[in-house]
């Protein structure tokens, strides 16, 4: 199910990220918007961060580092981190 051979486009990543976040955070897809702050607006706590980390691994086939986890302030930030990691992976795979 992973698309690891070529980097995904930002809209493709977000279209896969939003439903995963909604499921992991007990929300509806339409409630997950790019500009929302994960902690202050979506009320993500430490357990949710673990759920997000697992969800990213299952959905995109990549692992998030501690630095990645600390630098993701918004949903859009998380999407950019995933995009960067997929691009790096594709560069090393080819």
Image (tube, grey):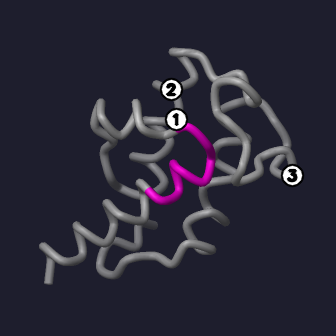
> Does 77 sit left or right of 43 as displayed?
left
Please, is residue 94 above or below residue 89 in the view? below
Report the Cα–Cα distance between label 2 and label 3.
20 Å
Disc 1, disc 2: CB below 8 Å?
A: yes
Assign a secondary structure to mark 1. Answer: helix
Q: Is residue 7 left or right of residue 17?
A: left
Q: Quadrant of residue 81?
A: bottom left
Quarter the C terminus occupies: bottom left
Residue 58 part of the magenta segment? no
What's the residue at 70%, 30% (across, down)? 25
Task: Name which residue lies at 77% across and 47% down.
Answer: 32
Q: Where is residue 56 drawn, in percent x and y?
A: 46, 46
Q: Residues within 10 Å of mark 1 (few under 14, many from 20)?
A: many
Compared with 63, 18 (above or below) is: below
92 on left or right of 77: left
Q: How many marks?
A: 3
List x then y, in percent, for residue 90.
Answer: 24, 75
Task: Identify which residue, 35 or 43, lies in the foreground.
Answer: 35
Residue 22, given in percent of the width and then of the height, sits at 73, 41
Q: Is residue 29 above or below residue 70?
A: below
Residue drawn 55% across and 37% down?
73
Q: Which residue is mark 1?
A: 52
**Separation of residues labelled 1 and 2 (CA atoms):** 5 Å
The residue at which mark 2 appears reads as 49
The answer to whether marks 2 and 3 mark residues whose Cβ atoms lie closer than 8 Å is no
Residue at numbered disc 3? 30
* Residue 74 forms part of the magenta stretch: yes
Q: Identify the element where label 3 is drawn.
A: helix
Query: Tag 3 or tag 2, which sits nearer the N-term?
Result: 3
Per the rendered image, the range of residues in magenta is 73-80
């Amino acid at each position: 199910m992973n698309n690891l051979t070529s980097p995904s486009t930002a809209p493709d990543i977000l279209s896969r990220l939003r439903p995963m976040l909604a499921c992991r955070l007990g929300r509806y897809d339409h409630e997950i918007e790019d500009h929302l702050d994960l902690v202050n607006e979506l009320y993500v706590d430490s357990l949710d961060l673990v759920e997000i980390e697992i969800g990213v691994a299952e959905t995109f086939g990549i692992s998030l580092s501690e630095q990645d986890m600390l630098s993701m302030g918004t949903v859009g930030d998380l999407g950019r981190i995933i995009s960067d990691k997929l691009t790096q992976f594709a560069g090393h795979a080819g």
